[in-house]
Image (cartoon, rainbow, N blue to C red):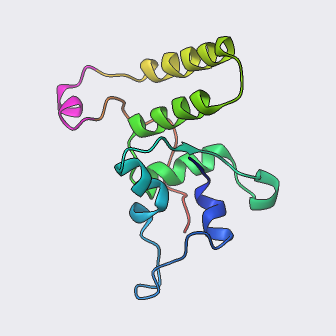
């Protein structure tokens, strides 16, 4: 499954909680799908139409949806696996992503205990709006 958090809001594909008059991003369909074991890729849909970027979608995923860095890495790898590119290109992309992720990997046992294999990527969630 591919999803763009911003476009799911702006198109009305995911509506706010009418009782609370706000969004509980932790209940976004992408989070629910991930919790239920589906392979989910995050994307930017149409950046020119939705005035967004993949970086912005990852900020929402981390800052609002509460997804771990491991979920983000898995999402990127799922997107590669589902793509229509050749196996060679998939291998090269997977290798680059895993190399980048391993650069931030830690031996911190406290983090590992919480099933968080990667410290926060250098993506700030402070400016996430919604």
Q: How many marks?
A: 0
Q: Residue furthest right?
A: 48
Relative vertical location of residue 39 with respect to residue 127 in this rendering, above or below: above
Relative vertical location of residue 16 with respect to residue 103 in this rendering, above or below: below
- Image location of residue 68, percent across then percent down: 38, 42
Residue drawn at (69%, 48%) of the image = 53
| The C terminus, quarter of image | bottom right
- Image location of residue 43, percent across then percent down: 64, 46
- Image location of residue 114, percent across then percent down: 21, 38
Q: Quadrant of residue 102?
A: top left
Residue drawn at (35%, 50%) of the image = 35
**Stretch of the chain drawn in magenta:** 107-115
Q: Quadrant of residue 51?
A: bottom right
Instruction: Give left or right: position of 24 versus 122.
Output: left
Residue drawn at (71%, 28%) of the image = 84
Pick the residue in front: 17 or 61.
17
Relative vertical location of residue 7 with respect to residue 109 in this rendering, above or below: below
Q: Is residue 34 magenta?
A: no
Q: Residue furthest bottom?
A: 19
């Amino acid at each position: 499954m591919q999803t763009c958090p911003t476009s799911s809001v702006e198109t009305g594909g995911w509506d706010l909680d009418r009782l609370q008059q706000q969004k509980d991003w932790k209940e976004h369909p992408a989070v629910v799908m991930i919790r239920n074991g589906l392979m989910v890729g995050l994307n930017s849909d149409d950046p020119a139409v939705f005035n967004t970027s993949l970086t912005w979608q990852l900020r929402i995923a981390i800052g609002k949806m509460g997804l771990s860095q491991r979920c983000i890495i898995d999402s990127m790898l799922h997107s590669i696996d589902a793509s229509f590119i050749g196996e060679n290109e998939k291998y090269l992309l997977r290798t680059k992503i895993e190399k980048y992720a391993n650069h931030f990997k830690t031996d911190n046992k406290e983090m590992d205990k919480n099933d968080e294999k990667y410290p926060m990527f250098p993506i700030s969630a402070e400016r996430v709006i919604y």
